[in-house]
Image (cartoon, rainbow, N blue to C red):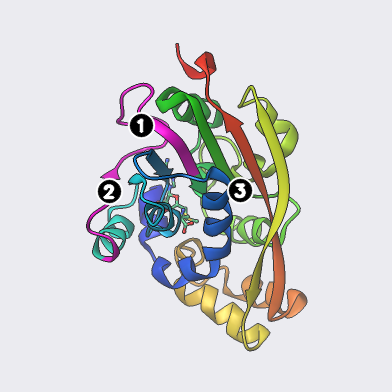
């Protein structure tokens, strides 16, 4: 099962608005400015990229899934949108002042390689800001539950990007903080139906995960906070080989 097919399933443009607070937080911490070059890795439909561009920065969004990039491009035709893999970034060394990712690069299978690529394309004084679901948080719990109905994903478990000890092995100079995305639906049943209809990984189970998703929201409720880790790192020569 290809990652692109999973993220193209359902309707990701319905999911993205729920994650705007995290995109805003990541952009605020990266603090891009006019004339700076910014990369949003695994940008999806462009939540963080579009907000970064509002600061006057020159922004490139990269993602594996062409369907999501098409939505991003339709929303913001002036940004640069590139189809590609976070593990093999199609950019020269030291191309960006800031590299961002919001619940994005965590899904690339090889964490070491992805982190090396992010550091390689970053300028020496550049900033990295990455948001990833923590293993203990509600979004990670939902991903694990749905994953039980899909073929095993290759590579490292995505939510390890939300584990402070693990990400310290990926970046030499790092600061971590925890934050929450607040989700709110009318009822727990609405929440479950929303994920069953729109969330690619659930859709890809062909209905097999639906009962578990309903049981999950019956327990969690219509309103909940999902924990994520924000890591902030700086550039330097560490990523270059
Ligand atoms: C949960 S979505 C997050 C999208 C966006 N950053 C946001 O905040 O809405 C995960 C994204 O990771 C992308 N993705 C997964 N594996 C990838 C890889 N190896 N390289 C680039 N993008 C990848 C998917 O296509 C999808 O757009």
Report the residue marked by disc 1.
Answer: 89
Residue 220 locus on image (x, y percent): 75, 74
Q: Which of marks 3 and 1 is nearer the N terminus?
A: 1
Rendered view: 88 above or below 204: above
Q: Name the residue under label 3.
A: 132
**Prevalent SS, magenta region:** loop
For the C terminus, the image quarter is: top left
Span colored in magenta: 75-100
Q: Residue at x 23, y 55 (%)?
A: 78
Instruction: Tell me the CA gap for discs 3 and 1.
Output: 19 Å
Which residue, given by chain and number where applicable, does mark 2 sit on?
Answer: 81
Asked whether disc 3 touches disc 2, contact meaning CB atoms under 8 Å apart, the reply is no
Q: Are marks 3 and 1 in contact (CB under 8 Å)?
A: no
- Label 3 SS: strand
State yes or no: residue 81 in magenta: yes
In this view, the mark in front (2 or 1): 2
């Amino acid at each position: 099962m290809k990652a692109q097919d999973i993220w193209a399933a359902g309707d990701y443009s319905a999911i993205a608005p729920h994650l705007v607070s995290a995109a805003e937080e990541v952009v605020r911490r990266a603090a891009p400015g006019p004339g700076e070059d910014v990369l949003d890795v695994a940008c999806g439909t462009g939540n963080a990229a579009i907000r970064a561009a509002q600061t006057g920065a020159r922004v490139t969004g990269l993602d594996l899934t062409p369907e999501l990039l098409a939505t991003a491009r339709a929303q913001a035709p002036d940004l640069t949108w590139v189809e590609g893999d976070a593990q093999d970034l199609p950019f020269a060394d030291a191309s960006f002042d800031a590299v961002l990712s919001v619940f994005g690069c965590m899904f690339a299978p090889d964490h070491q390689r992805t982190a090396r690529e992010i550091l390689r394309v970053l300028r020496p004084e550049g900033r990295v800001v990455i948001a990833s679901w923590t293993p203990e948080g509600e979004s990670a719990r939902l991903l694990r539950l749905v994953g039980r109905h899909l073929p095993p994903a290759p590579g490292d478990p995505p939510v390890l990007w939300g584990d402070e000890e693990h990400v310290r092995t990926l970046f030499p100079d790092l600061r971590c903080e925890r934050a929450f995305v607040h989700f709110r639906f009318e009822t727990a049943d609405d929440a479950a139906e929303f994920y069953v209809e729109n969330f690619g990984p659930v859709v890809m189970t062909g209905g097999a995960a639906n009962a578990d998703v309903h049981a999950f929201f019956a327990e969690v409720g219509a309103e909940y906070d999902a924990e994520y880790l924000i890591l902030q790192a700086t550039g330097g020569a560490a990523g270059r080989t």
